[in-house]
Image (cartoon, grey):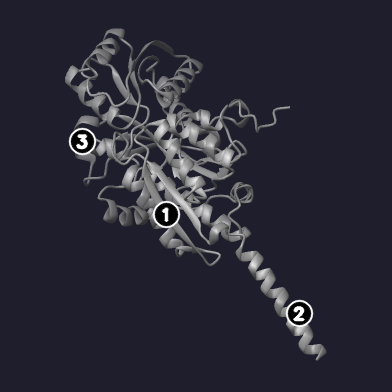
Amino acid sequence: MKSLAATLVAGLAYAASGGAASAQISDDVVKIGVLTDMSSLYADATGKGSLVAVQMAVADYGSKVKGKPVEVIAADHQNKPDVGVGIARNWYDNEKVDAIFDVPTSSVALPISALTREKNKIHINSGGGSSDITGPACSPNTVHWTYDTYSLSNVAGKAMVKRGEDTWFFVTADYAFGMALQRDAANVVKESGGKVLGEVRHPLNSSDFSSFLLQAQASKAKVVALANAGGDTTNALKQAAEFGITKGGQKMIALLQEITDTHSLGIKETQGLIVTDAFYWDRDDETRAFSKRFIEKVGHMPTMIQAGLYSATMHYLKAIEAIGTDEAPKVMAQMRATPINDFFAKGGKIRIDGRMVHDMYLFEVKKPEESKGEWDLYKLLATVPGDEAFRPLDKGGCPLVKTN
């Protein structure tokens, strides 16, 4: 009898501990929300491809973590902060979403990060670019995974000024991302010994860049820098070609140009253009293997934002698996404590300010005769180590960073 009683007690204790362990996954499901641009100027660089990248990672992980299902939902924020925040609030309050991924458009990403902190959830940003996300607006609940305005500016700006292209004029998207990109690039130019001769700002999602480009042309700056992205970048580059800006001797640089933008414009129109990127499909066997699977599902090669989302999703699920809970502070601590080593990043690390630090790459668009295929677009000029590419931890103004 004593042995039977002991067995019963042990069995009850095991059941109780098992019940407690399973309760560590809130609502018995890990739920990821992909909040992105499905219908506007960033849809190719993010959009459907962002959702597919997250879904691929979840499927590759086995669609379960600690025996609990992983669900993925998605929505279009329409590049409107109020729409994005409304969706995110509903997801957190009613849909029981544990983490929001992607969020292109910095004017949407910044309030989503703030809301995520308020709700004590997790935000892993791949699409938004403003370096303020890990600067004054940093959060213990947000990771900035793929790129930011500082790294884009730092890698390309230094290289171009060093080559003698030392006077710049900015054509800038008039919202948080564009202004942060111009600010960071202008600082790099000046710190490298160059000068900024002027700037002009255009509305988001512009179709006519003629007046802005004429001002850039009249400035006689050696470099006309586009501090915008997506459809704005492609429209500006097309119209710059019509105005003969590069034929007149000025250099064009797109501070954020995704591979989908280069492909859309065509190699003939973009040959020689300098591009900073966090990912390129043809870098090695691992990147080629992932990209082959991705293009079969989406129809184009992955952008850095989309490749970064696969990487981030895997890292998030591995953290939950390792600690047995989806509780935000514990998951964030585990993600920060674990290096990232995959096809996207080698030796990547998440700092206390939320910045995921990894190598960045400087590319030049190939000449048509150098290209061996539809997506063979870039040649590598330089690999810039993460600690050199991204802003130093103590220079961003993040309140989480101890500077004493």
Question: Label 1 sits on what residue type?
Answer: Val
Residue 20: x and y, percent? Answer: 66, 65
Which is more toward the observer, 356 or 98?
98
The residue under label 3 is: 266
Q: Is residue 286 visible?
A: no
Identify the residue shown where x is 46% and y is 46%. Answer: 91
Q: Residue furthest bottom?
A: 1
Question: Label 2 sits on what residue type?
Answer: Val
Identify the residue shown where x is 27% and y is 56%. Answer: 296
The residue under label 1 is: 72
The residue under label 2 is: 9
User: How far is the residue under mark 1 from the one under mark 3?
Assistant: 34 Å
Residue 42: x and y, percent? Answer: 32, 36
Task: Please tell me whether residue 348 is drawn above or below residue 254 in the rendered image.
Answer: below
- SS class, disc 2: helix
Residue 338: x and y, percent? Answer: 60, 51
- 346 relative position to 329: left or right: left
Task: Please tell me whether residue 79 is drawn above or below residue 187 in the rendered image.
Answer: below
Task: Please tell me whether residue 107 is drawn above or below residue 12 in the rendered image.
Answer: above
Q: Nearer the viewer, mark 2 or mark 3?
A: 2
Q: Earlier in the sequence, mark 1 or mark 3?
A: 1
Which is more toward the observer, 250 or 232?
232
Q: Earlier in the sequence, mark 2 or mark 3?
A: 2
Q: Earlier in the sequence, mark 1 or mark 2?
A: 2
